Image (tube, helix red, strand yellow):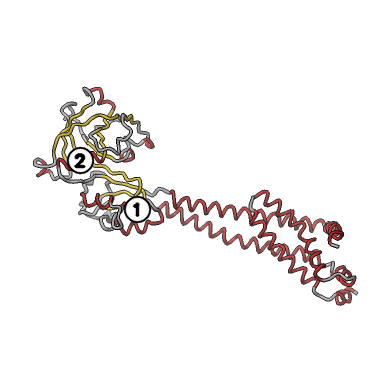
Amino acid sequence: GGKIMDPYLFKRLWRRPWLSLCGLVLSLTLCILLGYLSGHQQELKLQLEETRTSYDILCVVTDRRGGSSSGLKLGPEILDFVLDEGDEGLAQFVRDLRITKEFDYTCPMLGLFALEDLTLAGVNSERCDPLLDPELGAQVTYLTEDFYTQDGFLCLIPERLTAELEGDKLILNVEDPYISPNIRKYVGTGQVELTVAGTYRGESNRIFISFDAAQRIAEEISKKHSFDAMSFLAADNERLDELYSVAKRYFSKVDPNAGNKLAHKPALTVYDEQYRATIAALEQNIERTGYLLPVVLLLGLGVGFLISFLFTRSERRTYALMRTLGMTRGRLFGSILREQLLLVVIAVAAAVAMTGEIMQGAVYFLCYAVGCAACIFKAIRVPPTAILRDQE
């Protein structure tokens, strides 16, 4: 039976050691290559998915020329549009929103009239300004944990000003630059008392309050909710085209040749070039790897056919004698096939142990077996009497 025949077949396999070794090496090489390509393709797919979901695409509001992203003096209708969570608003496409509202100020308490860049800035995030952003090396000491989310009159001041303060109160005379100068003296100016809630390190005269507090001040002195700088990250990288489409209602694309006016439609720059280039490169590599996988499987089928052909071409007389002794074609086919698959089983097992790609190893084994089966079927389909007659 089959159990008595198997040891004999295994011994016969080594009657051609170089051919056996060649088959083993070829199968091991191709199977490892197949596992590597498959694993590499899976890694690329994971990178592609991670890029699509976690890549930060920065969107910045600028003037029409794209030359400035601060001091924009943009009105409440744009702010409402960006914060609108409905289908017509931009909020659905926005995450990590950073908004800044700026005022000019004077402070008699500190005698800062002769200094320049006296700006009271309302911010909703530490990432709104390099003086506050720890990722850019800023050092800020907070006396309250919710500074950016509250609407009270709390402020952050430069460390060097703390020595000039008596207590923790700061009184500022503020002007809202959103209001044109010719009517600012009637509306758009006021006085505000702030409580120091922290300090930052750096040479600057900027005093920071929360954005909500800045909107309260703007409402009190100029009756307008405006802002001067805005940036955000795209909430869904797969919906960039929708972002562009919806943003067109209030934003234009950068035009270096535009006039020096915002004309109620500032520009929105979406820095997605690197993202799109990364996605395109990953998709191209995945596609190329996909082309190579069937090529390796086809080579495996070819190797199975070739090795079996070289083994069986000089054994046709033996097969004919076995048939004449009563062995059926099916049993003979199974016996030769087991003989040919012994080495590929070893090669596949070693390759799977090295690459961890069990499925690809199984697919390679199947392709190799198909190649072997096709050759063996061709070798034994001729009647044994015809084979013996040809051999004589």
Residue drawn at x 20%, y 29% is 170
Relative placement, left or right, of 318 versus 164 is: right
Residue drawn at x 16%, y 36% is 174
Q: Are marks 1 and 2 in contact (CB under 8 Å)?
A: no
- Find residue 223 and report its horizontal and vertical position in percent: 15, 45
Q: Secondary structure at mark 2?
A: helix
Relative placement, left or right, of 316 versus 88 is: right
For the residue pair 149 and 243, the one nearer the viewer reads as 149
The image quadrant where one finds the N terminus is: bottom right
Residue drawn at x 29%, y 41% is 124
How far apart in space, not on screen, are marks 1 and 2 (Cα)? 26 Å
Identify the residue position indicated by label 1 in the image.
93
Identify the residue position indicated by label 2 in the image.
216
The image quadrant where one finds the C terminus is: bottom right
For the residue pair 16 and 77, the one nearer the viewer reads as 77
- Find residue 283 and report its horizontal and vertical position in percent: 50, 57
For the residue pair 173 and 23, the one nearer the viewer reads as 173
What's the residue type where badge 1 is placed?
Phe
- Find residue 339 and report its horizontal and vertical position in percent: 80, 61
- Find residue 88 and report its horizontal and vertical position in percent: 28, 57
Residue drawn at x 56%, y 55% is 41
Instruction: Classify 234 as above or below 143.
Output: below
What's the residue type where badge 2 is placed?
Arg
Res 238 label:
none
Relative placement, left or right, of 186 versus 107 is: left
Instruction: Classify 371 as above or below 97.
Output: below
Q: Residues within 10 Å of mark 2 (few under 14, many from 20)?
A: some
Q: Residues within 10 Å of mark 1 (few under 14, many from 20)?
A: many
